[in-house]
Image: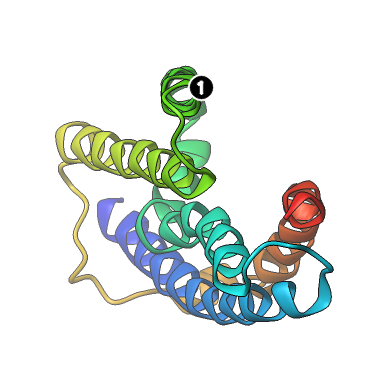
Amino acid sequence: DYNGINSILNATRRQYTKIGFIFSGLWISMSFLMPAFTRSSLDYWFTYSVTFLAGIGTILSYFFISKYTVLLNADKQVYILHILDGAISILNCILKVIVINAGYSIIIVQFCVIGTILLRIVVLNLYFKRHYQYLDRSVIPNEHAIKKRWNVLVHNIVGLVTNNTDMMLLT
């Protein structure tokens, strides 16, 4: 039932957009506060920039691809994500080595990471346009089907803390 799939996917998209806004606000706040609470010889705005850029990938994911990862999980096609993420990780490492060896700053390295995240978004969007042509954003979202949606927010906040603690401490 494509209509049912679209209604749930559209509700999921709306939910991830809301979570994206919440996460963006939290991340921007943390980016402003991090330099104030850390003792460092680094400039405030440099520390802010590194912190802020470290979260851009997650923010972009919420707004552009999280809904697709949910569909791939439900469709038992998660291996697509694993293959893509593996390729992106390899590209990411290669770019980091090149940029660091060229003597560029950590800010430029972070922009390279964002570039690979944007590439991931483009590739996933192309994949979905080709393999899931029935997706329709105009179908009315079925909010009832995703009752426990706020669990996703809590899970992602915990993931934020767990996955970014090292970056925060290094910053």
Query: What is the x, y in percent for residue 10?
Result: 35, 67
What residue is shown at x 15% (from left), y 33% (from top)? 130
What residue is shown at x 75% (from left), y 57% (from top)? 168
In the drawing, does residue 51 fall left or right of residue 15?
right
What residue is shown at x 71% (from left), y 59% (from top)? 160
Residue placed under numbered mark 1 in the picture: 93
Q: Nearer the viewer, residue 5 or 73?
A: 73
Image-quadrant location for residue 159? bottom right
Label 1 environment density (alpha carbons within 10 Å; few <14, some 14–19, many ≥20): few
Q: Nearer the viewer, residue 97 or 76?
A: 97
Query: What is the x, y in percent for residue 46?
Result: 56, 64
Query: Disc count in the image?
Result: 1
Query: What is the x, y in percent for residue 122?
Result: 24, 41
In the drawing, does residue 102 fall left or right of residue 136?
right
Image-quadrant location for residue 30? bottom right
- On-image quarter of the C terminus: bottom right
List the single residue furthest toward the front. Answer: 41
Q: Nearer the viewer, residue 60 or 67?
A: 60
Q: Secondary structure at mark 1?
A: helix
**Above or below for 8 versus 150:** above
Query: What is the x, y in percent for residue 88?
Result: 43, 26
What residue is shown at x 73% (from left), y 72% (from top)? 34
Q: Nearer the viewer, residue 112 or 9?
A: 112
Color scheme of the displayed model: rainbow
Residue type indicated by callout 1: Cys
